[in-house]
Image (tube, rainbow, N blue to C red):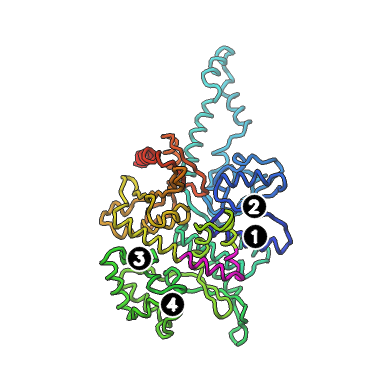
Amino acid sequence: ASDVDALCACKILQALFQCDHVQYTLVPVSGWQELETAFLEHKDQFKYFVLINCGANVDLLEILQPEEDTFFFVCDSHRPINVVNVYNDTQVKLLVKQDDDLNVPAYDDIFRDEEDEEEDSENESDGLEPSEKRRRFEEVSPLSQTWVFFSLYRREILFDYEQYEYHGTSSAMVMFDLAWIMSKDLNDMLWWAIVGLTDQWVQDKITQMKYVTDIGILQRHVSRHNHRNEDEENSLSIDCMRIAFEYDLRLALYQHWSLYESLCNTSYTSASLKLWSVQGQKRLQEFLADMGLPLRQVKQKFNSMDMSLKENLREMIEESANKFGMKDLRVQTFSIHFGFKNKFSATDIVYATVSLMENIEKEGPETTNFIKALDSLSRGNLDKLHQGLDLAKKQLRAIQQTVASCICTNLVISQGPFLYCSLMEGTPDVKLFSKPVSLCLLSKYLLKSFVCSTKNKRCKLLPLVMAAPMDVERGTVIMVGIPPETESSDKKNFFGRAFEKAADSTNSRTLHNHFDMSIIELKTEDRSKFLDALISLLS
């Protein structure tokens, strides 16, 4: 699939294949249609297919209709996993961590063997006269009452199981685990696993608790791979790579930008200080004054700031942030050093890779962006990574400007059970938000900011549905639903199922093509009836 975690898992798998000289074909897919097409094109040449971050949450065999000698290895963080995939022990092999709790219903609760059905119907008809038997058979046939009861019970269990969409352990971490078990894990692979996990955190796909737990697991691997004897003065060569665990500032790209730009374009600081208002800009100046940082220093590139200021910068910022109500400005993360000169944090890499993958400037065929993003993860391609960082700055600026204009022009409206915001054609940067990851980032930043700006207590607890123009010529919009922004949020999303039901009940022309069920495409003229159905469904 086209997401950063999948790219990282792919890099680890490629490295493992390289170890054993395994030949393979790599095909990027952005949705179910592309997955089906890719399978049809390759099914005659290949018998083994590895699906990364796609394929777990639908019945694969039903969708792809493969031959009996075709096998699928599915490494996918999407949950819940389709029950048919879980209980298929021949053609579908799921790669999941052993301690991942999948909460799958018991086999006997959802599947009945044909023998069981026959027994049931025989038991019911035994002891009746032939004429009675026939009449009774006509009344109940073709399903016995037991079967009807079982169907209702099964539907209820599956509804509870499939109601919410959420994410399990990052696929890159699962792949790294595999490499570690095979004793083929390298420092590069460990770094990709870190970036995969960080992607889940940046995109708000997992809870803080899950993030901290997984960071702890990776930290043990980091100390195993990166311990060096401190006495050896020359132990660090110019082309070496080392990974370090650290408590860093939650400021986007600040080491490759100016501190001022980073404070303005990070969702956490921007929402906390309410930077879209005049009052917010004033608070930012007070915040900088409280730290005792001169504006001239803050507005120049981070690399060019005075060394004396940079040495205690984190402590200074944290101390002032606490006074201004930003208690979570410090975050556990990892950074990587290439030789002496280049240092990147894991979040830098995530932002850079996302913006390379969703770059809207056309440069050749569809797969160009995917290949570029994949290449930027290798340490030999620093030029591509720097290009990604420049694009990421543009993307973050565009997101913050759009958030500010949505809040200042009151575009976020309460529809009852959810908040709704729609971007109009002609809005600046609207083309960027026709891409799924960028639209999701925008939606999450907008909801954070709205919760900080609204006085209405009820609105603070609502989820958000956001729409943006997708393809003007075809008259379609892309729509995403995200769960409420609360401290205790379990990051589970109910919009996938709700979108399906609303589309069915109104015959809206929708396309449920994304691997995340909570992202759909919809015909513009069907939007109002679709939203009406969604409101009545969730009320």
Position in image of residue 345 (x %, y %) = 50, 71
Q: Which numbered marker is on residue 302?
A: 4
Tell me which secondary structure the magenta stretch mostly adopts: helix
Label 2, on which residue? 50
Q: Which of marks 3 and 2 is nearer the N terminus?
A: 2
Instruction: Using the numbered discs, state the Cα–Cα distance from disc 1 to disc 2 in whole angstroms.
Output: 10 Å
Residue drawn at point x = 68 percent, y = 47 percent: 42
Circles 4 and 1, Cβ within 8 Å, touching? The answer is no
Q: What residue type is labelled 4?
A: Phe
**Helix, strand or loop for disc 4:** helix
Query: Tag 2's secondary structure?
Result: strand
Please state the extent of the stretch shown in magenta in the rendering. 375-392
Of the two numbered discs 4 and 2 in the rendering, the one whose residue sits closer to the viewer: 4
Q: Name the residue under label 1.
A: 13
Q: Locate residue 312: give its quadrant.
A: bottom left
Question: Gap between marks 3 and 2, in whole Å?
Answer: 41 Å
- Tell whether 42 sits left or right of 30: right
Report, in whole angstroms, how far the alpha carbon at label 4 lies from the one at label 2: 42 Å
* Cα–Cα gap, marks 4 and 1: 36 Å
Quarter of the image where one finds residue 226: bottom right
Q: Residue at x 54, y 68 (%)?
A: 385
Q: At label 2, which amino acid type do we have?
A: Val
Residue at the image position 54 percent from the left and 54 percent from the top: 77
Q: Label 2 near label 1: C-beta < 8 Å? A: yes
Q: Residue 270 carries which label?
A: 3
Q: Which of marks 3 and 4 is in front?
A: 4
SS at circle 3: helix
Tag nearer the camera, 4 or 1: 4
Element type at mark 1: helix
What is the spatial separation of the Cα atoms under label 3 and label 1, in whole angstroms?
Answer: 38 Å
Q: Which residue is drawn at 61% across and 44% down?
A: 37
